[in-house]
């Protein structure tokens, strides 16, 4: 019918899918198929933080940057500089111990995307963990020392794990 056809036709690259309690995903690949009796589309989607990976780093002058803006708000922090290039994203929670840190940056590669810079350079330099809220499109930052909560649970191959497969994909 016409309704099903409209939905089928609307499935295309860069469309957003929303999954309750998980967040938004962007369709990144669509393949049309026909199996003899029905048309179908094979769809691949990536987490909405792919939007951050699609933005290139802005020019950052060599110098020392506080993580977030100073008290007067006259000088932007490194996080605000990056988030300004991400129109739909905002800054969420920032751990106070990370917000007060200063780090020096030199020769920041403007061919690097913002996601890579946040997950590699920022996390290393400020000793923090960047977490993306894919429902509200916020970037939350936690101090490494505050993020992990130790428990009395220990999982070892000898005691509990019978088999384990770990697959890494460079795109994930």
Image: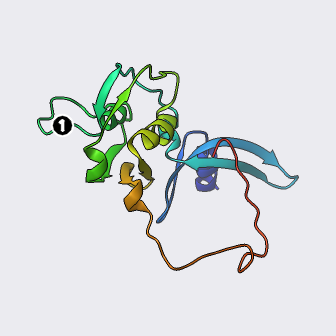
Residue 35: horizontal and vertical position, in percent?
Answer: 86, 52
Residue 77: horizontal and vertical position, in percent?
Answer: 27, 34
Q: Is residue 166 left or right of residue 100?
A: right
Residue 11: horizontal and vertical position, in percent?
Answer: 61, 46
Residue at screen point 62% across, 55% down:
4
User: Quick one: 10 or 123, which is closer to the camera?
Assistant: 123
Residue at screen point 47% across, 30% down:
55
Residue 75: horizontal and vertical position, in percent?
Answer: 20, 29
Q: Residues within 10 Å of mark 1 (few under 14, many from 20)?
A: some
The quadrant of the picture occupied by the N terminus is: bottom right
In this picture, is 151 found above or below 135? below
Q: Is residue 59 left or right of residue 27?
A: left
In this picture, is 15 found above or below 87? below
Residue at screen point 44% across, 27% down:
57
Q: Is residue 33 left or right of residue 113?
A: right
User: Quick one: 22 or 147, which is closer to the camera?
Assistant: 147
Element under label 1? loop
Q: Quadrant of residue 155?
A: bottom right
Q: Which residue is label 1 attached to? A: 70
User: Quick one: 43 or 167, which is closer to the camera?
Assistant: 167
Residue at screen point 53% across, 41% down:
50
């Amino acid at each position: 019918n016409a309704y099903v056809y409209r939905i089928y036709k609307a499935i295309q690259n860069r469309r957003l899918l929303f999954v309750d309690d998980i967040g938004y995903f962007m369709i990144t690949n669509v393949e049309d198929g026909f199996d003899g009796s029905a048309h179908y589309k094979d769809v691949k989607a990536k987490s909405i933080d792919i939007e951050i990976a699609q933005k290139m780093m802005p020019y950052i002058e060599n110098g020392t940057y506080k993580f977030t803006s100073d008290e007067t708000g006259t000088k932007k922090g490194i996080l605000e500089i990056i988030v300004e290039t991400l129109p739909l994203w905002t800054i969420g929670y920032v751990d106070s111990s990370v917000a007060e840190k200063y780090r020096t940056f030199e020769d920041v590669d403007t061919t690097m995307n913002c996601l890579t810079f946040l997950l590699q350079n920022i996390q290393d330099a400020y000793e923090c963990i960047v977490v993306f809220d894919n429902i509200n499109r916020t970037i939350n930052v936690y101090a490494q020392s505050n993020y992990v909560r130790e428990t009395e649970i220990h999982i070892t191959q000898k005691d509990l794990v019978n088999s384990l497969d770990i697959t890494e994909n460079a795109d994930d």
